Structures are given as C-alpha cells and as structure tokens.
Image: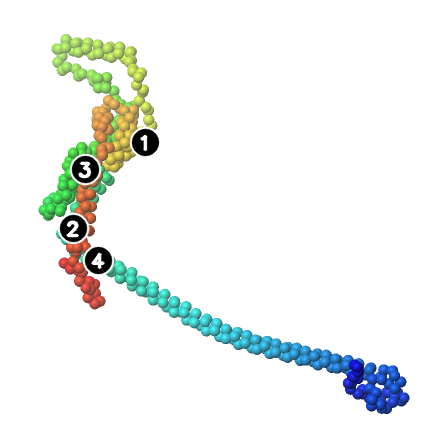
Amino acid sequence: MNEEKPALTAPPPRNDREPADTPSSAAPGSYGTATDGRPAASNAPAGRSALAGWSMLFAVAAVAAAGWAGWQAWETRSQAAGLREELARRLSDGETIAAEARGIARQQQETIAALQGKLGAIEAKVEATEGQAAALEALYQAFSRTREDEVVAEVEQTVVAAAQHLQLAGNVQAALVALQAAEQRLALQDRGQLAPLRRALANDIEALRLQPAIDIPGLGLRLERLLERADAMPLAFEGQLPAGEQPEAEAPAPAGEGDIAARALEFGRALLADIWHEVRGLVRIERLDQPDPVLLSPAQNTFLRENLKIRLLTARLALLARDGRTYVADLAQARLWVERFFDLNDERVQATLAELQELQQVALSTELPALTESFAALRQLQSRGRELAPATAPAPSPAPAGGAPAPQR
C-alpha cells in the first residue's frame, strides 16, 4: 500500500553540450525512470547541485569568518592606536608633571635654604638670649644673696686656702692663721645658724695647734748656710799639720851679756828638743783601719763641691714639699761625702757634720689634719640654704619692654 513518491527536484539546467539524441522533452508523468525502464539521467546533475550548495555554504562561512577576522583585526588595530595615543598623552602629562615637580622641588630647596638661614640666625639669637638670661640670673642671685650667704662664702674661701696651705706646702702656721681669721669673721655675725660651723672651725684650730711645729723657713736658712760653706771647707788631702807638730821658731837671744847661765840653759833645752824631735821622727805610728785621704784633681774637686751643693738643694726642695724620705736620703749622702772627702780636723767641717746630723733628725712625714669638720659644716649650711631658697627668695619683677628684669633688693 506504500506508494513511492518521486523526489521533488529542480529541473536540471540546460546543457548546450548535450548530445543531439537527447530527447528535448520528457513525458510529464515520467520523472524517475526512462521510457526503457533505466534510471533517469538527471541524478548526476542533482548531485552536482547539492555539492554546489555545500560549496556555497562553505564559501559563505569562509567569507563570514574572514569578515569576522578582518573586523577583529580592525578592532584590535583601533584599540592599539587608541592605546598608543593614550600612552603618548599620559607620557606627555607625566613629563609635564615631572617638570612641575622639579620646579616645585627647586622652590622647596630654596625655601629650605632660606629657612635654614633664618633658623641659624634664630639659634644664634636664642644662644645670646640664654647667655644674657644666665648673666641676669647670676646678677639677680648676687643682688638677692643675703649677708649670711656672703659670710659663708668668705669663710669657705678661707677654709679652702687653709687646706691648700696644708696639702701643698705643709704650712701649719699659715693654715692656723686662716682658720682663726674665719672664726673671727663668724664671731662678728653672732647668728645661731652659724654655730655648727664655728664649732667645727674651733675643733680644726685645736687640731692644728697640737701638731708639732716645724720651722720650715729656719731649716731652709740652715741649708742655705751649708751651701755657702761648701766652697770654703778644706779637703782631706789638703789638711795642715797639727799645731803641736809644727816646727817652733827659734827664740830670740836674751839681750843681757852677763846672763851666761840662762843662755846655756836655754841652749841645752833647744838641743834636747831637737834631739827628741829627731828621735820621734825615727818611729811613725799609723792607723790601718782608716783609709788614706782620696787624692782629687782640681776638676774632680770642683765636681765634688758642686755635687754636694746639688744634694743640699734637693734636700731643701724636699723640705718645702714635705718629702721626708728624699730629705733624709739627700742629707745622709751629703754627710757621707763630707766625712770621706773633707778634712775632719777642721772646725768648719766638724760644724757642718754636726748641723747635717741635726737636720737629718728632723721628722717631716707627719700626718696633717684635712679640715673635714669645717668642710662638712659648710656643706650642711649650703644644702640648708638651697632648700630654703625657693620659699624665701623674692619673686623677680616683670621685665620692662626692651630691657632686662630689674632685680629686687
């Protein structure tokens, strides 16, 4: 019952090259088969038409793809051109901004340099102002200082001078005089708050009075006399014979001619003295435990005396410096040289040795007081004054325009 329907196909195009025997027209009712029962010759043109359709479709698609690609390329090129223009514009803007920034930085540097100059001038003015303020403060403190503060300051200076006399020169008398002057200065004030300081000064004065008195100037003068005597003392090998051993001068003959007995007696005594002198000269007694005097040349003699002077000078310097060890060592060496090289029978040498021994026995290394009580009392008074200063000191009056503050009295 299924009837086959012929496919609707477009009439094939005419082909001028068809063979002459192709029928010009076909029967209306025969589409699919020929008259002789074989397939129609129009199947080949139908396949070609389908192939041409697909080709057309592919061509359209290719054209569409090419157009889309061209459009994309054009759009990309447009975007790249826009980006280049934007980049060029921004670069130009950046260069403009950089130029403006350089100009602003230059202006700021100039401004900073000007500000630094002004700041330096301001700092100089501030330092000058601070110096003036310090000077004004010192002036104000000097004007506002009470009489008691002045007395305490004077006493402190006196005590410091006394301590310097003790430590540097060892001069007990000068330190004692200074402390007594400070104590008298406090006695004139008669204030109760100064009583501890006065008591401390009295204790230090008593301690100085108990110190053994050493006459430093007198000892220095004695050493000075020894220096002058060093050139006059004779050396040991220059010593003279004792007075008893010197040959006696012949006594003058008596004037009377008749006193023959007296003259004979005198002649006999002289003869016996000469004989005894000659007999004593035959025997010589020497002590072997003592060396012979050292023989010195004139140059060595000069060097010996100069070295002795140098020892005495260093002993004098040690005396002034209260250096007991150096003082004793120099005097001992000077005494040893005098005993060895100089004539011990001479009175000047003996006096020099005795004086050197006395000077050597002087004790210089005595411990002197340090005036600690007086300094402690001064520090206590000063600390109390600093604690009471904020409550009792008057307030400074306001400074007038263009001038320094006027201190109150």
Ranked by sequence position, the earlier of labels 2 and 1 is 2
Does the image show residue 38? yes
Please tell me whether mark 3 sits on a helix, a strand or a loop: helix
Q: Residue lying at the far front in this picture: please name it.
A: 1
Residue pointed to by mark 3: 172
Left or right position of 181 against 118: left
Q: Quadrant of residue 39?
A: bottom right
Q: Which residue is under mark 2?
A: 149
Q: Position of residue 368 (x, y in %)?
A: 21, 36
Q: Does residue 285 appear left or right of residue 180 in this picture?
A: right
- Name the residue beneath numbered marker 4: 137
Amino acid residing under circle 2 = Asp
10 Å neighbourhood of mark 4: few (<14), some, or many (≥20)? some
Q: Disc 3 vs disc 1: Cβ atoms closer than 8 Å?
A: no
Q: Amino acid at mark 3?
A: Val
Q: CA distance from mark 3 to mark 1?
A: 38 Å
Identify the residue under disc 1.
Answer: 303
In this rendering, the answer to whether 69 lies above or below 180 is: below
SS class, disc 1: helix
Label 1 amino acid? Answer: Phe
Looking at the rendering, which quadrant does residue 105 occupy? bottom left
- Which secondary structure, mark 4? helix
Which quarter shows the C terminus? bottom left
* Between discs 2 and 4, the one toward the N terminus: 4
The mark lying in front, picked from 3 and 4, is 4
Which mark, residue 25?
Answer: none
Q: CA distance from mark 3 to mark 4?
A: 39 Å
Of mark 3 and mark 2, the one earlier in the sequence is: 2
**Could you tell me which quadrant the N terminus lies in?**
bottom right
**Relative image position of residue 46 (x, y in whole percent):** 80, 83
| Mark 2 and mark 1 residues within 8 Å of each other at the beta carbon | no
